Image (cartoon, coloured by chain):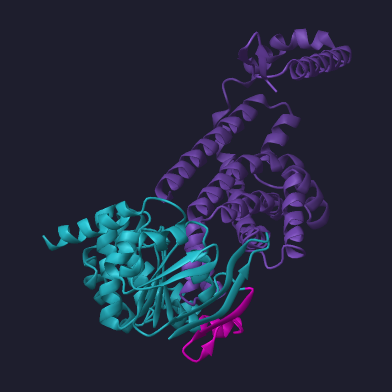
Chain colours: A purple, B cyan
Amino acid sequence: MPVLEKDGVRVWQRRSRSESLIRWFGWLIGVAVFMYCWQQISAVTTWFFVVDAPRIAGDIWDRATPPKWGYITQLGRPIWDTLNIATLGTIIALTLAVPTAFLAARNTTPSALFVRPIALLVIVSTRSINSLIWALLLIAIIGPGVFAGVVAIAIRSIGFCAKLLYEAIEEINESQVEAVTATGASRWQVMAYGIVPQILPAFAGIAVFRWDINIRESTVLGLVGAGGIGLQLSASLNVLAWPQVSLILIVILFAVVISEWVSAKVRGAII
Amino acid sequence: MLRLKKLLKTYKTGDEALKSIDLEVPDGQVLALIGPSGAGKSTMIRCINRLVEPTSGEVWLDDTELTKLSSGALRQERRQMGMIFQEYALVERLTVMENVLSGRLGYVGFWRSFLRKFPQSDVDEAYRLLDRVGLLSMVDKRADELSGGQRQRVGICRALIQNPKLLLVDEPTASLDPKTSRQIMRLICELCAERGLAAIINIHDVALAQMFVSRVVGLRLGALEFDGAPQELTPDVLTTIYGEEDWEATIEKVEDDEEEQVA
């Protein structure tokens, strides 16, 4: 289509005239919708508060500094809980995600018609609900505390880990699997020799990546009562103890930086 | 002795990869299977050990018919058939030793293999084979650290440690340079002679095939077009297999190569 004959010269354009017009209208509609939405949001925003924001932020900053360093003695236990929630949750999630991934991957599933859709459903449903919402549900079911946090993190992570893992399984080199099969190996041996070595780097990467995310997610679980440092954060926020809040934020930042460092090291070592 | 009777494979897409192949390979015979890409060479050798399920026909290995076997019995029979692959198909992240020992998987139970507790006799045999192909110093290297020729040698060891009666060899030299190609072909043929193994070697380098094997089978569009000694491969024969082309050059090259080797 884009090649036109004009006075015996063949002109090449990226798009034909009608295609260009359609795109131009597409953009026009997109921009119009954006402007309309902007206007709607603007109408329900109390601009007085927005204008006021820098002053309030400065005020909170003044109250929050310096952090109340002495409070650190009470944070050791909660941050330890937070790390445990993240770590245990990740381990549980991985043990459940591995079989799910093998059932979901097209090349390893026992039945693409029956088992695979179920595995995919597990992946989608656990992935689509935020861990904070899982925590709210679980607190109602098993009561507040660290255990609810662990389970919330575990459930939320299954889908994430299983999805990345089954994509890795689907991308393996089939000829290595074929070669192991040709030796007369059993189904499980083919898995252990042909598939597992190929997905091991991906598995390690996924595990530390999810652990890293879970440390960040578990810091807020306490806000709804599922244990960890979030509990202290919400208590301090409720009584407007800003110097404590700032110290907690520093501790969280520190924990996250450490976890980033650890996961970078692990990934570097394995891959 | 391997016998194929009216072996037929039609893929789901409707492609007739094999059209009723009849072939006999006596014990100890090394046979080269030539033919253009898509002629069904790979399909044929994969139908023998049922990596690809044949649509109909029979495959006899000695007195066993393979196409009707249950999966357990098939695994027993697969141990008799070593396979060597085009891109080596080593498990890249395992060591050379683990790759060689994986040839024993059919003989060893799951937990023993999972924990890498292979019988000492298997380990001894692995060392012997690696020594034979000149890779004894590479035992502990990871497979992806090796060069192409070295990897193919490991692939050969993996096939031989199965203690097979038959080797199925799929384009062993397609990703190797000309010199390494010859060394690998020579090695395969020597080892077959040493152990009295039969072999089917898929190969698209006609000159290389003529140099090493005693029998050549030509496949075209899933049907046998030629079966004879390598000297009988005339330009006319090559034209029926591959289509019209100036074949004198290919055949002349073979003669040149042989002279060079003599010199």
Say which residue appears at 26% left-offset and 61% top-offset.
B182
Picture quarter containing residue A143? Answer: bottom right
Is B259 left or right of A180, judged from the image as shown? left
Q: Which residues are magenta?
A: B55-76
Q: Is residue B239 left or right of residue A97?
A: left
Snapshot quadrant of residue A268: top left
Depth check, front residue: A271 or A10: A10
Which of the two residues, A3 or A211, is positioned nearer the viewer here? A3
In the picture, measured across the screen, residue A269 lies left or right of residue B212, that is right
The x, y position of residue B170, in whole percent, is 43, 65
Asked if the stretch drawn in magenta spans residue A130, the answer is no
> In this rendering, is residue A212 above or below A95?
above
Q: Residue at the spot x=48%, y=66% of the render?
A: B219
Per the image, is B71 magenta?
yes
User: Where in the figure is residue A224, as x and y percent of width and height?
Assistant: 76, 42
Rendered location of residue A22, percent (x, y): 79, 19
